[in-house]
Image: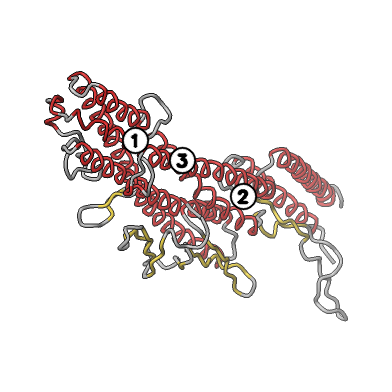
Amino acid sequence: MPGTFFGLEIARRGLSTHRTAMDITGHNVANANTPGYTRQEAVIAATDPYANPTLGSRLLPGQLGTGVEATMIRRIKNEYLDVQARDSISSREYWQVQEEIFGRIEAVFPEPVASGIASTLTRFFNTWHDLNNTPQDPGVKAAVAETGGELATMMREAYQQLEDISGSILKVGSDGNVTGGQLKDQVDAVNEILRQIRELTESIKRVYAQGNQPNDLLDRRDLLLDRLAEYGPVSVTYLTDGGKPTGEIALTFFGVDVRAADVTVGLKLDGAQSSLLQIGGKKVPLTGYPGKAGSLAGLEETRLRIAGYMESFNKLSEALRDAVNEALEQEFFTPLSSLKDGNFAVKSDILSNPSTIKGERALYVARLATIGQADLDGATFGEYFHALLADIGARSGSASNMAGTHRAVAEQVESLRQSVSGVNLDEELSRLIQYQYGYQASARVLATIDEMLDYLINRTG
């Protein structure tokens, strides 16, 4: 049967276990506001009971308890919530980046205002009506030239701003290679995140191989996986060996395995000038991947929209140039110019000498305001421009609404995840008091045994 000193070991185990539990609780409290931190707890279990071998018994655990131990430090984690959270993060970022870019696009067209393109276009045709009433009036001719120059300038500047926004998303060099922009910056960020995930995975595998629990390393990797989900769809599978975790994960980005160190994410342009990712040896079109997920796809979707708006705006300027020049039977807007060329303007000779304008043709130009143009699919200049504005406004509103909805969803899912994995200070302080009492009680047992041994050794005999 157990010896006299047996109780000392039980008390020692109690002290050690409760001190470990208090240390873990303190670690939780210290990281209450650390992004990505997952609450930890000590798994406390009774140690194997004492075996009392005798001549007629087998050497098996008996009934006399031997104390307590912290068998492991467990992360409180729900991996199914992680999957849902990453999906919601990807959807949120897809719409949120579009909301941001469309806000910049709308700022290019501050309509309706008295000094906007639509009102200037109306005023431009009105000056031709005025010129028709007084065909030889030099003042009215000057107003026609001035208003035309103002309209051309506003259209050039608006087109240039759209081009700048598009360039901020993706900048392409003269050789056709990607040189900058948000898309390139985000692809670089993805490669850096993948590098860190691979390094952490190797460290995690080594800790598991030694029989330990790499909780804080796992938190850091999960936080990186959340960040990766901001850029595109992520799929994570945690691999095991005989039911035991190994630390290895099966990780895909846009459906492509990205675990290997030689797999990098690149950005290319296809023949249609739309962007695609080159992940390892596979090409993934950003606008063709199933589902709407991640800021990379959101940026590309918006960039293509901007390209369409620029083409429509350029189409409007070319139709205006051709129609006015033809009706006036005179080169009013610079021949062969367009917004795409960057030199759409009233002819310099007319600006310097407005008296050369053919006033007798003014009515034919004025009528263009209400005549549908074949080059504009039968719409008038005003109708075509307002349709362009309506499309921008509708898509901007849709992006804002969807971004708001997915932000709310992401916040709700994150709230659910934090309810499981987050640190609740009230709960941790309650546990701290509980472990403190356990520690004090174990210390009291130790002191009592010490008194008994002192009496037995020093006071008897």
Three-letter code for the amino acid on which mark 2 is drawn: Thr
Residue found at x 66% / y 43%? 423
The quadrant of the picture occupied by the N terminus is bottom right
How dense is the environment of label 2, judged by Cα within 10 Å: few (below 14), some, or many (20 and up)? many
Residue 80 in the figure: left or right of residue 400: right
The label nearer to you, 2 versus 1, is: 1
Three-letter code for the amino acid on which mark 3 is drawn: Ala
Residue 311, percent across and down?
32, 48
Q: Nearer the viewer, residue 18 or 249?
A: 249
* Residue 443: quarter of image: top right
The label nearer to you, 1 versus 3, is: 1
Q: Nearer the viewer, residue 46 or 259?
A: 259
Sequence-earlier tag: 1 or 3: 1
- The residue beneath circle 2 is 38
Residue 67 in the figure: left or right of residue 173: right
Residue 198, percent across and down?
45, 61
Residue 445 in the figure: left or right of residue 109: right
The label nearer to you, 2 versus 3, is: 3
Sequence-earlier tag: 2 or 1: 2
- The residue beneath circle 3 is 390
Task: Estimate the spatial distance between the alpha carbons at disc 2 and disc 1, rounded to whole Å.
Answer: 65 Å
Tag 2, which secondary structure? Answer: loop
